[in-house]
Amino acid sequence: MDFDLARLMNSESFNSFWFWLIVAVSWSRMTHFSLGAGLHDVRDAMRNGGADMDDLESMIHVNSRKLTNTFDKYGVWISSIGMFLIATIVTLGFKFNIEMMQALGMLLIGLLIGNILALRFAYRVISNNLRGSELCTGFTKLRMAKQFVGIVAIFVTSFYAAYFLVILRGI
């Protein structure tokens, strides 16, 4: 029952407390906040209406406009550099068996899918000028889709981690 600080600070990914902490915090932030608004903002807007709904609409519309304008200007570059980095990480991880890159690749691919869903919703907010309950419903569906992606990503990552640790590494 000794406390082993060296084991706690271990940099191996799938066997590390810190990796799973980063996974939990990343997915928690990804699913709670989207386009500058949190779930509590949507609940307050649906419950109270009025100024809370106006604030929510303003937050989401401003952040959607910023995101879509940025992507319209620099989307090709952002996509190219992002895909190059993810391809490099996945290649280093799975071709050259670098455990940290495998874990990072699995985390980043899931987060990328979640961000693509948010970008699609931002374009929908701008093009359809979503307001009121329609905006809240769309935001809630976006959050549920991100949660589903997160569940699948964590499930796949944890099963691969078990496979890696038990079969490949023999722990």
Image (cartoon, helix red, strand yellow):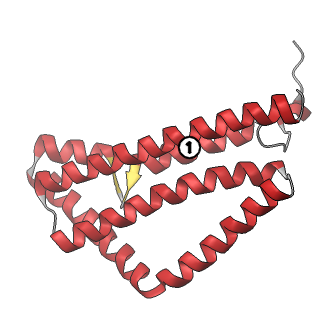
Please indicate, yes or no, whether residue 15 appears anywhere in the rendered image: no
Describe the element under mark 1 as helix, strand or loop. helix
Q: Residue furthest left?
A: 50
Q: Is residue 132 left or right of residue 166?
A: left
Q: Nearer the viewer, residue 23 or 167?
A: 167
Looking at the image, which residue sits at the far top?
1
Residue at left 38%, top 60%? Answer: 118
The residue located at (27%, 46%) in the rendering is: 140
Query: Which residue is more in the foreground, 74 or 21?
Result: 74
- The quadrant of the picture occupied by the C terminus is top right
Q: Is residue 38 above or below residue 64?
A: above
Residue 110 appears left or right of 165: left
Picture coordinates of residue 116, whole percent (x, y):
44, 63
User: Which residue does the numbered mark 1 point to in the structure image?
Assistant: 153
Residue 5: quadrant of the picture? top right
Q: Position of residue 123 (x, y in %)?
A: 29, 71
- Residue 8 in picture, x, y percent from top left: 83, 33
Q: In this rendering, is residue 125 above or below 166? A: below
Q: Position of residue 66 (x, y in %)?
A: 36, 76
Kindly identify the amino acid type of the residue bearing the numbered disc 1. Answer: Ala
Say whether residue 52 is left or right of residue 161.
left
Front position in the image: 105 or 139: 105
Q: Residue at x 91, y 34 (%)?
A: 6
- How many C-alpha atoms fall within 10 Å of the one at disc 1: few (<14), some, or many (≥20)? many
With respect to residue 80, does 54 lie above or below? above
Quadrant in the rendering for residue 51: bottom left
**Foreground: 13 or 9?**
13
Residue at image location 23% in from the left, 72% down from the top: 126
